[in-house]
Image: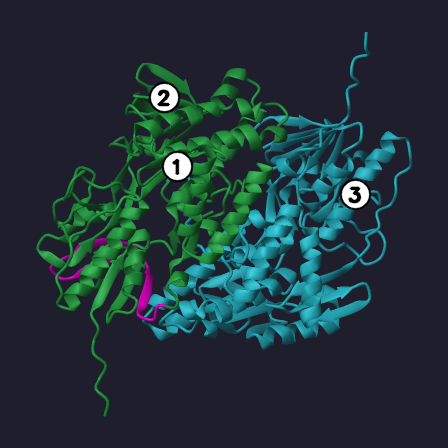
Chain colours: A green, B cyan
Amino acid sequence: MADPAPVLPTVLIVGGGFGGLKAARILAEAPVRVVLVDRQNHHLFQPLLYQVASATLSPADIAAPIRHILREQANAEVVLGEVTSVDLAARQARLAEGGTLAYDFLILAAGSRSSYFGQDAWARVAPGLKTLEDALEIRRRFLLTFERAEQEEDAELRREWLTFVIVGGGPTGVELAGTLKEMARLTLPREFRRIRTDRARVILVEAGPGILANFGSGLSEQAVQGLERIGVEVRLGQPITGIDEHAVQLGGERIPTRTVLWAAGVSAVPLGASLGVPTDRIGRVLVEPDLSLPGHPEAFVVGDLAAFTHGSGGPLPGVAPVAIQQGTCAAENLLATLANRPRRTFRYRDKGSMATLGRGKAVAHIGRLNFTGYPAWLAWLFVHLMLLVDFRSRVFVLFEWLWAYLTTQPRARLIVERKRRDG
Amino acid sequence: MADPAPVLPTVLIVGGGFGGLKAARILAEAPVRVVLVDRQNHHLFQPLLYQVASATLSPADIAAPIRHILREQANAEVVLGEVTSVDLAARQARLAEGGTLAYDFLILAAGSRSSYFGQDAWARVAPGLKTLEDALEIRRRFLLTFERAEQEEDAELRREWLTFVIVGGGPTGVELAGTLKEMARLTLPREFRRIRTDRARVILVEAGPGILANFGSGLSEQAVQGLERIGVEVRLGQPITGIDEHAVQLGGERIPTRTVLWAAGVSAVPLGASLGVPTDRIGRVLVEPDLSLPGHPEAFVVGDLAAFTHGSGGPLPGVAPVAIQQGTCAAENLLATLANRPRRTFRYRDKGSMATLGRGKAVAHIGRLNFTGYPAWLAWLFVHLMLLVDFRSRVFVLFEWLWAYLTTQPRARLIVERKRRDG
């Protein structure tokens, strides 16, 4: 008689973003059972989410079902569900839908969400950009304002409709500001009869002294110039002090606007707080050098949910490369433990940063080199195409970009009304 | 001094579907001011809407902003708004958003909506397929049921989740049934670990004696055989007598299911009733042979909203070719009046019908010829590509179809949650 099959240890991965998905793939050949749980059915390529918001790409271009990505990985199961808390002592995760998932090893990669610095009333007025739903909502609001402006008889209200304020000068805010201004300037003018869409004001507000702070001061200034050249107004050192449905307040100045988009801050998902372990100011879990939780070597935290404070430079930025490298490290440390090998300390290799500033323009620093303008844009294009999760996305996104670049007429300018669920 | 510019007559077109858009284009060079009002910002290629529901195509593949389509037509303005009533005596249309639009000529092309034979409770349980929102809702429900089934421990409930009932054996119901069954049979099996998606039941229910009733009995029977070959269960002559959240009632039989999709009936939009003119049983406006309203030669009704009962064969089917030909006729009759020429009587030229039955299979009758199988599918593919409203849609849809056909892995399998508006 054959021996009964050994019971494999269960690795529960919470979150199918860059960190969680990478960890699952590293474990593909390992003698473990991988259970990946996510509250969405899709992995999302967040660095291009602003292009869904600006109607250049469709959701299907930058998202793919997690099941599809892992379909050939025999040791992986995918669960659609939201983990609301983890009981580290009992080694169980609780689902919002009811029920629990037991584990032997845990990799928490549940990410972050938009944070409004405690100003919860702002959340309703100023949508953030973290999910496909967010992107479609921003697209809807952006396109609707031009429709409203076209119908508006009052010149002052028309200006209010045609003013867009983007809060936050990180890559998301910068890329959103550039692409929305280009849409108003290059795509829409011929479609409207009464308004001059090219005169729409796009204002990028940053509380700190410069945009793209992580890129270094040379590129930060070039980015300001690049945005100003296409007509984006950049306001530096001006924290937002109020947002309502008709205006933003910038210190003493009131800017009338109907559209405020939020790219200013994130905090870790609340799941981190459920662990009962130390977290930082924005809810990120403080991790050991091997990315495990203090006193819980079987539990790892990676990506936006982790605060890695070892080594120089303080906590790491919430970007895809950090999540991918941490997902790799956590999975490898897990395998090391299974094989009775020592674990390694996580070390982040910063390969650079890049951001687009509109059509055919970007800033990038790669290694020690800075690029700007068209070469930076080509580098950005190449890198992002290569990072897309599967071949088909690369093909289709390349076509969409070629089309949008050559015609200035991106395809996805659809207002799809959200109905109430009971509607 | 130059003469003052003459005041051009205003032609108000209500609806940017096939009929309204065609009428607008016919009037492109005419000495009129065209105002096209639609409650959506996009023209929708409805014959392919089921492919958005079945996650093969993205909304942007089959819809384009009406403004974009008419951007080069200098005499056309586009208004985003919903016309709720028309005052024929005052020559004014009232908007849901407030305000009115005055006209000299009117072309009503506002279409139809799903109708539940007075069973309004069914509408909540069984979504219809008329808009992009409908298609995305059907996609979401369809994909979610497999997720629920994968998590379900109870075998009977699992069967309930994996049963799909499609009500209505017209082209929409037939194509939806075929494509959903193919998805369950060809696309999903490798992605799930516990359920056999290929065993999902897809049941097509038709109250009448045959499906695709307009196609003639030979093709109707071939369509049944084609669907049954890929595993769709076809129930003929069985009217639905009840729908709730756990089952449909077919006479004495109760079929447990969580997913019921409605392709059984349409009625004209309520706008028709606001006119105070005779309508038929499903709310369509009875029109004169020249498509105008009795006693109102300046007002035309075309497409799904019109009941054209002159000539043989009774009222015409609610399909795109009827709408396009009527939009053309109404616009030409309007031009005839402007030029003091007599109007012509509308005459429908039926060029044929076609419907897909899954991957690489279709039935079609074109002129007097019947086609089935692969040749019919190729004809279907060619005709639908050519009918898409612009070149870019053709290119991208062709790519999506090639991809889906070759890999059986269509790209758009995304569950995007609908949030409440106040969320």
Residue B121: x %, y % from top left: 50, 55
Count neighbours of disc 2 (C-alpha within 10 A) and say few if under 14, some if 14 to 19, many if 20 or more: many
Residue B287: x %, y % from top left: 79, 44
**Magenta stretch containing residue A42, yes or no?**
no
Question: Is A177 displayed left or right of B346 in the figure?
Answer: left
Amino acid type of the residue tagged 3 in the rendering: Thr
Residue farthest to the right, as pictured? B341
The quadrant of the image that shows the C terminus of chain B is top left
Count neighbours of disc 1 (C-alpha within 10 A) and say few if under 14, some if 14 to 19, many if 20 or more: many
- Whether pointer 3 and pointer 1 mark residues with C-beta atoms closer than 8 Å, the reply is no
Magenta extent: A73-94
Residue B4 appears in the figure: yes
The residue to which callout 3 is attached is B328
- Residue occupying the point 29% across, 52% down: A324
- Residue occupying the point 51% across, 74% down: B253
Amino acid type of the residue tagged 2 in the rendering: Arg
- Residue occupying the point 23% across, 81% down: A5
- Residue occupying the point 83% across, 34% down: B335
Q: CA distance from mark 3 to mark 1?
A: 49 Å
The residue to which callout 2 is attached is A235
Instruction: Give A389 or A105, whichever is nearer the viewer.
Output: A389
Label 1 or label 2, whichever lies nearer to me, is 1
Q: CA distance from mark 1 to mark 2?
A: 18 Å
Residue B294 appears in the figure: no
